[in-house]
Image (tube, helix red, strand yellow):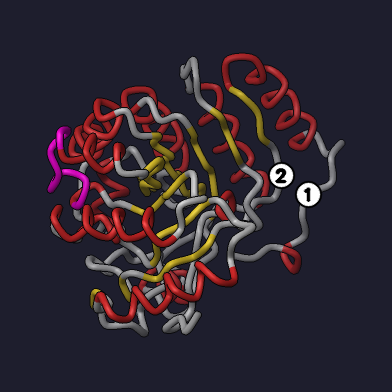
Amino acid sequence: MPYEGTVIRPPSEAFSIILQVTVGCSYNKCTFCGAFKDKRFRVKTDEEIDDDLRFASQHCRRQNRVFLADGDVLILPQHRLSALLGRIRASLPWVKKISLYGNARSIRSKTVADLAVLKGQGLDRIYMGLESGCDEVLERIHKGETAATMIEAAQRVNDSGLFLSATILLGLGGIELSEIHARQSAAVLNRMAPRQVAALTLMPLPNTLIGRQYQSGLFRLPDQLGILRELRTLVAGLELSRSMFHANHASNYLPIEGVLSKDKHRILAAIELALAGHTPLVPDNMRAL
């Protein structure tokens, strides 16, 4: 398919059909994110999307999931998003699940009833970037949200019956706010009650504000052990009965995953072993976004 620019997707969508519906991100102001800095946000035309659907109908018949890219397809008006899901079902009838990124603002632009309609049309999962549950960190990174507004968005997703996956960024508070970032993120995730928590580790990029702050010394990123201590605080504070936890993204120093209700003690034990130096960490030259 003729993608515009670099297309990103969650690790769990590695084997999905990637259908680029929007180009870039409708917000694109977060200081840590360099994924869409070179793109002006636009929604692809129906003709462009239909061309991609025709290609997928001929060449992607062994893939039964679709991920809608780029950064925020959920920002589409309800009628257009609903029509899109209908066209996917008509063109790719073997597809079982459809997923997309949705920021808190676009989620709140939909009612619970709207989201439930989309679920009935095949939408299965929304990936939402919490990044941090600490309001001071959220303000520093220009997220444009607070912990309260993100909890509200998460509740709408849960009430609609959709699967919510929430992302947290280790290191985002820097050394200064490391502990409170981890502790308050756990508290907010407990209130959001996502079905999946994905922890990534911040890697400051040169085309971002936080990357320039890092290079100039204005932002100090915790070292490997500092990141592991954040991870330990985060996991220790999570009280989620039906959630999966993943820290196996390529940016992380210690790949771990499990179901929190049964694996939390095992995950914490693995972190303690790494902190004690008994488990090798992923070297920096092997880490990536």
- Disc on the earlier residue, 1 or 2: 2
Residue closer to the observer: 35 or 227: 35
Is there any visible trace of residue 147 in the rendered image? no
Q: Secondary structure at mark 2?
A: loop
Up-down relation of residue 139 to residue 71 (above or below): above
Decide whether residue 109 is among the magenta residues.
Answer: yes
| Side of 108 relative to 217 (left or right) | left
Residue 284 lies, in percent from the top left, at: 72, 64
Q: Secondary structure at mark 1?
A: loop
Decide whether residue 70 is among the magenta residues.
Answer: no
Residue closer to the observer: 178 or 199: 199
Q: Which residue is mark 2?
A: 254
Kindly indicate whether the residue at mark 2 contacts the one at mark 1 (C-beta within 8 angstroms).
yes
Q: Which residue is mark 1?
A: 281
Crowd rating for badge 1 (residues with CA inside 10 Å; few <14, some 14–19, many 20+): some
Q: Quadrant of residue 86?
A: bottom left
First to last magenta residue range: 106-113
Q: What quarter of the picture does the C terminus occupy?
A: bottom right
